[in-house]
Amino acid sequence: MSDSILLRWTSEATRGLEGYRAAGGYQAARRALTELTPDQVIAMLADSGLRGKGGAGFPTGQKWKFIPREAPVKYVVVNADEGEPGTFKDRTLMEGCPHLLLEGIVIAAATIGARRAYIYLRREFHRCRHLLEEAIAEARRAGLIGDRLLGTEHSVEIVVHSGAGAYIAGEESALLESLEGRRALPRLRPPFPAQSGLYGKPTLVNNVETLCHVPAIVGLGPQRYKELGPPTLFSVSGAVRRPGVYELPLGVTLRTLIFDHAGGLAPGRRFKAAFPGGSSSTLLCESDLDVRLDYDSLRGAGSMMGSAAVIVLDDASDMVEVIARAVEFYRDESCGKCTPCREGTVWIGQILERILHGGGREEDLGLLESIAAGMTGTCFCPLGESVPPNLVLSLRRFREEYGRRLSGEARHGG
Amino acid sequence: MSSGERGGWVGEDESARAAGLSAAARERIRGLSRLYDRRQSALIPALFVAQEEAGYLSPEALEAVAETLDLPLSEVTSVASFYTLFYLEPVGRHVIQLCTNLSCMICGCGDVARRMQEILGVGPGETTPDGRFTLRAVECLGACEEAPVMLVDEDRWPRLRPEALPGLLERYP
């Protein structure tokens, strides 16, 4: 990991401020705040090709550029509500090196002219919360955040704000609702947060990993950063021998990631499928093992980069159980705002349950297809839209597994 | 997202309502509201302050939070009932959050959950009769490299095996 850009910081030696600074930490912030103009920083991000790492993949430079310069009050909000099933890179970064995130926040806040930044951190990340609070106190004492930080005219306060258990709060407009102290229901967009975000003010919402790339881009320059990959964090879990976060160049193939880096499968097991970008991304099958894990290739394969969380299924997994469990998740996490998601996930869940427990009917498969069609393009936000693609794919590519359930051949799911 | 039926506090006297939250907790909540440009932003942090004090959010505690932040009780109740980590009923001294999402399922959380239920004698969402543990089956905890994984209070326990559970639970008297 020594030649990595992000994970090299996640060692005991650089967890505290002293070690982080000794290894070159906060140099990029100093450069951004004292040597570069905001336009230059934004141009570097644009040139780097950095895209949001939370799931949507929106170009980061553009997002920063959209914040109106002249607005008197602006905010930075960090999306640390990492909840997409299979994703744990943000937690790894925050537990490994909280100052890396703080440095990214300082650069972001100074660049867009925000005086306050909120880290919306999911409540379950207790260790992250303690480490971040400690790091913020350390950085404040050292004049790295607070008033006139680094001896410049910039002032930034960073507040850690706990979520309270709601996957939907990871969607950026729902996150802002939650940060305003309400139920986390997504907002109609436009307006986008860049125009009207927290309290209706221009707000830059960035994912943890996205902000952790910023010091490297400012420090190395966008060209060098791109030559190094560009680096991407993949969270790999499920049926692999070495689950973990891997920093690899964008565009590594699914096969290389699973078999060369994550240790392959357990002996005697056969690859069945993988979610390439969290459970909201469409499954890749055995014929897709050589697909490159980058934005365009995955879109070409009918899936998406998402949060780059690769959940691997081998032949021990029962596809009907996997899909039923995924649907259960979206059903439980549906905020209830729109009907297709709120009702559709319940109906699909009920039908899958009866198929799993031996009460399925042949016509259920067509019924599932028709509910999926009714949900497609009709949900208010991406949560509900995540359900139909994998359900439909499983009905087509793994139909025999449903068939065995319907004919009573398969074991009953527990 | 249940919004459980609660009642019984309408008409109670003022001192009983004030009992929902200590003076120190009210002061902490007022301090939290200064971190934000609008005071409602302090609602979720305030609910955690109240929950830490009594272990759960009683109707009296919800009313005290509403009063401290000068928000309608209906709004406070609406928010408290939306999020899964606010407990509107009493819970055990220790809360176990066992992940049952995909990566943990693939790595055998089903066996862990079955053993856990045998040991505790309760199912998901229930509290042991001695009030020691509340067991909750939860969604992805963001620690899938450690699957199957659970939280007991604030502690994360990785790579769970059914046979290791009795010893592990002994740490939580």
Image (cartoon, rainbow, N blue to C red):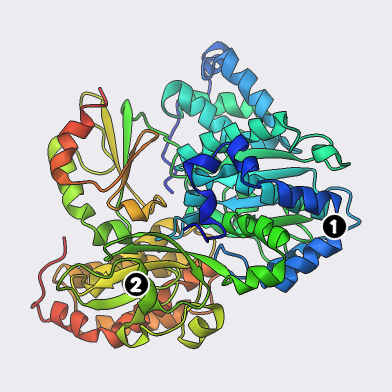
Chain containing mark 2: A
Of the numbered discs in the image, which one, if any, rests on residue A36? 1
User: Can you say whether A399 is above or below A2 in the image?
Assistant: below
Q: Secondary structure at mark 2?
A: helix
Chain identifier of the residue bearing label 1 in the image = A
Residue, disc 2: A260
Q: Is residue A317 left or right of residue A11?
A: left
Is A169 left, or right, of B129 in this rendering? right
Depth check, front residue: A173 or A182: A173
Q: Quick check: A405 above or below A34?
A: below
Extreme right residue here?
A70
Q: Position of residue B64 (x, y in %)?
A: 57, 23
Q: Which circle marks residue B141 in the picture?
A: none
Q: Residues within 10 Å of mark 2 (few under 14, many from 20)?
A: few
Quick one: SS at disc 1? loop
In the rendered image, the residue lying farthest to the top is B15
> Image check: A1 left or right of A208?
left
Does any portion of residue A392 appear in the rendered image?
yes
Percent coordinates x, y for residue A407 in the rendering: 11, 81
Badge 1 or badge 2: first in the primary sequence: 1
Amino acid type of the residue tagged 1 in the rendering: Leu
Position of residue A329 relative to residue A146, above or below, is: below
**Residue that appears at 76% across and 61% down:** A194
Residue B2 placed where, x, y %? 42, 46
* Label 1 – label 2 distance at C-alpha: 40 Å
Q: Amino acid at mark 2?
A: Asp
User: Percent from the top left, x then y, of residue A234?
Assistant: 46, 65
